[in-house]
Amino acid sequence: MKRHQHYLLYKPYDYLSQFINNQTKRKNKKLLGELYNFPEGIMAIGRLDQPSEGLLLLTTDGKFSEYIRSNKVEKEYYVQVDGIITNTEIAQLIIGVEISTNEGLYKTKPCICKIIENPNFPERSKKVRDDRHGPTSWISITITEGKFRQVRKMTAKVGCPTLRLVRVRIGEYDLGNMEIGEIKQLEL
């Protein structure tokens, strides 16, 4: 029986979380396959949208993918937001906010959220913005669900739009001291 392969990847900014571009309008997008010679049948577990960065798990095992995408597994993000976020907005995020989805309005499940110090990530390929546009702050938000652009919609709902989003943890797997674009093979 063929052994499945699993990888951790620090997805860079401006990459799609896919290996094949099946879009006709935007043909020159950066894809994960450009970063490494992955085995046939590899898939990203969940997605990070093009402007998001951070931890992505890749696997050839559909059952492992299904488990990681389930609501049994926490996903933690460090989010740089526009403005100085307050404890009032944090409290709103913790109890859940109403966001729009393809199915209509949806109230997010309770989550873990707190203000954090600037995590000093490496500069990304495109600067977020410069200081003359006003202050920013950082939060950690941990969710167990994953609606389309959920974290971005949540922070916008409380009046603090997301400027930079970096997933730092998926369950027991974390970004640690990985470099942008770095890939590590997992032994499970």
Image: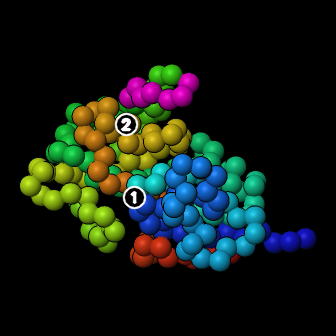
Vertical placement of residue 59 versus 38, above or below: above
Question: What segment carries the magenta color?
Answer: 97-103
Q: Where does the image place residue 119, in percent across and percent down from the top left?
A: 28, 64
Q: Residue at x 42, y 76 (%)?
A: 179
Q: How many marks?
A: 2
Residue density around tag 1, few if under 14, some if 14–19, many if 20 or more, within 10 Å:
many
Residue density around tag 2, few if under 14, some if 14–19, many if 20 or more, within 10 Å:
many
- Is residue 46 in view from this perspective? yes
Specify the farthest residue to the left: 132
Asked whether, in this view, residue 153 is left or right of residue 120, the answer is right
Please name whichever residue, 133 or 187, is drawn nearer the observer in this view of the structure.
Answer: 133
Q: Residue at x 33, y 67 (%)?
A: 124
Where disc 2 sits, the SS reads helix
Where disc 1 sits, the SS reads strand
- Is residue 168 in view from this perspective? no
The residue singled out by tag 2 in the image is 154
Please name whichever residue, 113 or 53, is drawn nearer the observer in this view of the structure.
Answer: 53
Marks 2 and 1 sit apart, C-alpha to C-alpha, by 15 Å
Which one is earlier in the sequence, the residue at label 2 or at label 1? 2
Q: Residue at x 48, y 68 (%)?
A: 10
Q: Name the kind of residue labelled 2 in the image.
A: Met
Q: Name the kind of residue labelled 1 in the image.
A: Val
The residue singled out by tag 1 in the image is 166
Please name whichever residue, 88 or 147, is drawn nearer the observer in this view of the structure.
Answer: 147
